[in-house]
Amino acid sequence: MAKYYLPSGMRYATLEERKQFYISEFNLSEVAQWFEKCIGKVNFAVIIGRHTRIYPEKYREDADTTIIIDEYHGLNEVRDQILEFLPESAYYDRNVYDENDRKTGQELAFDLDPENITCPIHGSLADKMKRHQGLSFCALELQMVREQAISLYEYLENEFSELRIVYSGRGFHIHVFDPEAYTLSDKKRRELARTVKAKGFGIDEWVTAGEMRLIRLPYSLHGLVSRIVVPVEKSELERFNPVVDARCIPKFLGEAFTS
Ligand SMILES: [Zn+2]
């Protein structure tokens, strides 16, 4: 098995690049729009350097830690805190809390990742793990995960109506904003995760079942692949190619790079 890592053109972002991105490209009005329908306060989170091992020296001890950002006034302050940590990844908490910080529900989401796809060339996740390539993926896996996002969307449309797809940097997320999806029981979520998995979709069951409550923040930078996390319309998914699509390519990679 030949060594492989990421589709060509994808790579880790440096600290300086993360900084540049969050100063000049991170679009707070788009982020605000994403949370428009949310009731209550949103908690954010960052991971500084767990996978990339790239972190500001002063945060060496916290490079692996999931740092929760729950004390802020306005998204400007969230950005300020992101700029302080310069993380490889930024997330938000799908849990919905009341004014006493009690959980009242959770946004339903599906996380389709290339590592959960069995690739005709690189094999299953177990095969990849054996080679210590659990986070690697190839262009073919990316294409397969996109096909899965399209069919999972169509499957979910039978039950839900307010669906959004997000290119997550590696694969795709499908978010469900139907009000009744927020109050699904844990049991129902686990069943849904199992059903979808049994249908052959390469989802991360933990995300759908709710144990993993964090999800990548739309419009943030995915620092492992140097791509911007962006919502994508279902109708354009068929043609969407994150290797070259201008919407998800940060300026630091250069304009010549985009198609
Ligand atoms: Zn592959």
Image: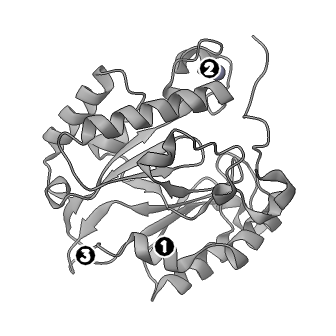
Circle nearer the N terminus (1, 2):
1
Q: Is residue 209 left or right of residue 75?
A: left
Residue 75 placed where, x, y %?
50, 82
Left or right: where does residue 136 sit relative to residue 125?
right
Q: Is residue 222 visible?
A: no
Relative to 201, residue 206 above or below = below
Callout 3 touching callout 1 (CB < 8 Å): no
Where does the image place residue 254, in percent across and percent down from the top left? 84, 60
The residue under the point 20% across, 60% down is: 105
Which callout, 2 or 3, points at the residue further toward the start of the chain?
Answer: 3
Residue 9 position by quadrant? top right
Residue where numbered disc 1 is placed: 31
**Disc with the residue nearer the chain's start (3 vs 1):** 1
Q: Callout 3: 10 Å neighbours few (<14), some, many (20+)?
A: few
Which label was assigned to residue 39?
A: 3
Mark 2 or 3, closer to the camera: 3
Q: Nearer the viewer, mark 1 or mark 2?
A: 1
Front residue of 235/178: it is 235
Reply above or below: 164 against 40.
above
SS at circle 1: helix
Is the CB of mark 2 within 8 Å of ligand 1?
Answer: no
The N terminus - image quarter: top right
Q: Residue 99, located in which quarter of the rendered image?
A: bottom left
Mark 2 — residue?
A: 128
Helix, strand or loop under label 2:
helix
Q: Is residue 67 above or below residue 224?
A: below
* Residue contact between numbered discs 2 and 3, judged by CB atoms under 8 Å: no
